[in-house]
Image (cartoon, grey):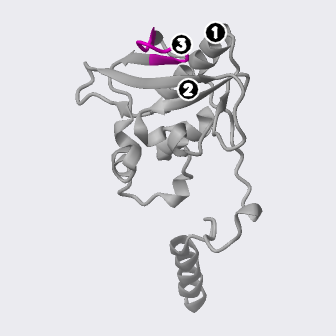
Amino acid sequence: MNKIVLSMGMLAVFMFTGCGSVDPSMPQSSVHVKKKALTIKTKGQTIFSSVAGSETLFKASHKLKGKHRAVAKIVVPTINDINKEVLRRGYRYYQIVSPTQINNLEGFPINNKNDLAAFLNPQTSMPRHELSMLETGATLMDNQKSQSVVSVPFLIFGTTEFNLVVRLVKEPRVEEIVWDAKN
């Protein structure tokens, strides 16, 4: 009888201590997390319009019908379309000028679509075991100052929208943070 009680106690300890989770005190190099590239196709479209009085500035607006909490569904196709448009205009590099939360002119360090999608929508990059039971997409987004970059409608019948102003760059200076349209 004592062996059964002892073994059940040990089983309970293993179950409730989280022995299968990653130890946060371990260095990140010892935790192997495989990242896969984001390739998302949507039914939305990106519309480009010129900014008055400038040959190197244009606005990119990507709209997707409905409410989409997965921001990567709108960020990744927008950046893919911007890359094509930048190359079509004869440039290789560009910077995001607006919105201010992700403005490269002010030193915002992200310049690839996967990192931008993860920054704007952290639940796409956070391992599930690091989330508490009460954390959802809404609470994670509320913790980010970037939540207003993508306009997500209140109702499913609205339109999710991502608007960027882009500056074309021929030859970037060393200190400039630029996006490479060929990546």
| Residue depicted at x 52% and y 60% | 130
Q: Is residue 140 left or right of residue 46?
A: left
**Type of the residue with mark 2:** Val
* Residue 142 against residue 90 in the figure, above or below: below
Per the model, the C-alpha gap separating discs 3 and 2 is 25 Å
Indicate the secondary structure of the residue bearing disc 2: helix
Q: Which residue is mark 1?
A: 89
- Location of the N terminus by quadrant is bottom right
Q: Residue at 68%, 33% (x, y): give it.
A: 37
Report which residue position mark 3 lands on: 55
State which tag comes first along the sequence, 1 or 3.
3
Range of magenta residues = 49-60
Depth order, front residue of 87/80 = 87
Q: Residue furthest bottom?
A: 2
Which residue in the rendered view is the most extreme toward the front? 53
Any mark on residue 76, and which?
Answer: 2
> Under tag 3, what secondary structure?
loop
Percent coordinates x, y for residue 97 in the rendering: 48, 31
Front residue of 64/50: it is 50
- Amino acid type at image mark 1: Arg
Instruction: Report if the CB atoms under discs 1 and 3 are less than 8 Å apart.
Output: no
Point 41% across, 24% down: residue:
163
Helix, strand, or loop for circle 1?
A: loop
Q: Position of residue 17 (x, y in %)?
A: 54, 75
